[in-house]
Image (spheres, rainbow, N blue to C red):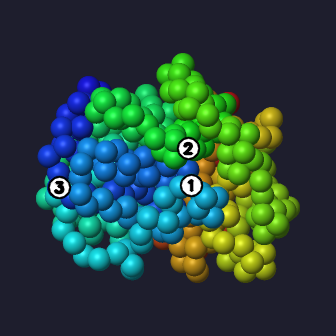
Amino acid sequence: MTPMSNVDLAGAVARLRTAGSVVITSHLDPDGDAIGSTLALADLARALGIREVQCLNNDPVPSLYQWLPGASQIETPESAGNTVRDLAVVVDTSVWDRLGAAGDAVRQAREVLVLDHHLADAPIGDRFLVDPGYAASGELVMELHDAAGVDIRGETAEALYVAIATDTGGFRFSNTTPRTHRLAARLVEMGLDVAAISERIFDGMSPTKFELLRRALGRAEFAADGAVVHSAILQEDIQAAQAGPDEVDGLIKYLRNVDSVQVAIMFRELDDTTTKVSMRSRNGFNSAEFLQQFGGGGHALAAGATLALPLEEARGVLLDRVTPIVGETS
Ligand code: 5GP
Ligand code: MN
C-alpha cells in the first residue's frame, strides 16, 4: 500500500463486491484517462454483478472521446436522477473541487472509494487507493480487473488503451514505465486498431481546433530567457473559431515543445472574472507543487488551477511567481 492509500487492489475489489448500486465519477474537464477509466470501471462493476451502475461527470464527454463504446452512458448532473447509491467510485481525482456538481452524488452515497494517481495530501473518501506510480488511472483500473479475476472485454480494452495512451502522451512522457508497456501490450494483443485510435486521439484535429491553435501560437510570449512560454485563449477566440470549450485541451503541448522552454503556461478566460491555468513543465520544475498555492494541483509535469481573477491579472500574478523560480532551477 502506498502512503496515500488506506486500501489495496484486493480491498477495493471487496468494496465493489458488496455494493448493490454504484455511481462512478471523475474530474470536470474530463480527459482520456477520466473517460476511459470511468467506462472500464462501469464494465468491471457490471461484471461483478452490481445491478445499478451509473456513470456521472460534471461535464459532457469531450468530442475527442465520444466514439468510445458506451461513452453515451456518462450522464451529467442536469440529466441524472437523484438516487442515493451504496457506493460512489471517484476515479482520476481525489479532491472535491475537481468533481464539480457531480460531487453531490458522491456526498450522498453510503460509501466513497477513490482510485487515483495524482499527488494528494488528503484524499477524499472512506477508502482511497492513490498511487502516483501509475502513469494513468487506467493502469490502476486494469489491475483492478486482474485483482477481481474479471476478463477485459474488447470494448473495455479500447477505453483502457485510450486512458493509458493519453496520460502518457502516447507512451512518451516520463511517467511511462515498463508496467505501462506491459499493460498496454496486453490490450494490443486483444486486437486493438492502435493506428486508428492514435489518429483519433492524437493526430486528428478539427478545423475549429486548428483555428484556436493558430491564435494561441500567434499570441505566445516568452519570459525568463525563453525558459517560460505563455499564451492565452480568450472567450472571443472560442466564439470566433466556433470551437467547443473542450477544444482548448492539448494546445499547450505545442508551446512546451520549444527547446528552451522549461515551463509552458496557457491561460484560458472562462468568464470575465475566472481564469483556468494549464501548466506543463520539463523535469526540474514541479507544476503541481507550484500551483498548490493557487488551489490547483495535478502531476509534477502537468498541472492546472482555476483562479478567481480576470485573465490579465491571473497572468500577472502567476508570472511574477514563476519567473524567479524557473531562473533558479534552469
Ligand atoms: P489540464 O491542464 O490538462 O487541465 O490539467 C493537467 C493536469 O492537472 C490533469 O491531471 C488535471 O487533472 C490536473 N488539474 C487541472 N486543473 C486542476 C485543478 O484546478 N486542481 C487540481 N487539483 N488539479 C488540476
Ligand atoms: Mn489521469
Residue 167 at least partly seen: no
Q: Position of residue 83 (x, y in %)?
A: 22, 72
Q: Residue at x 56, y 32 (%)?
A: 190
Determine whether 194 is above or below 23 in the image: above
Q: Nearer the viewer, residue 143 or 152?
A: 152
Q: Position of residue 60 (x, y in %)?
A: 51, 69
The earlier-in-sequence mark between 1 and 3 is 3
The quadrant the N terminus occupies is: top left
Calculate the distance from the C-alpha at mark 1 to the C-alpha at mark 2: 7 Å
Q: Which residue is mark 3?
A: 20
The earlier-in-sequence mark between 3 and 2 is 3
Q: Do residues under tags 1 and 2 come within 8 Å of each other at their CB atoms?
A: yes
Q: Which residue is mark 2?
A: 158
Amino acid type of disc 3?
Gly
Calculate the distance from the C-alpha at mark 3 to the C-alpha at mark 2: 27 Å
Q: Check disc 1 and report its element: helix, strand or loop.
A: loop
Residue 105 at least partly seen: yes
Q: Check disc 3 and report its element: helix, strand or loop.
A: loop
Q: Which residue is mark 1?
A: 68
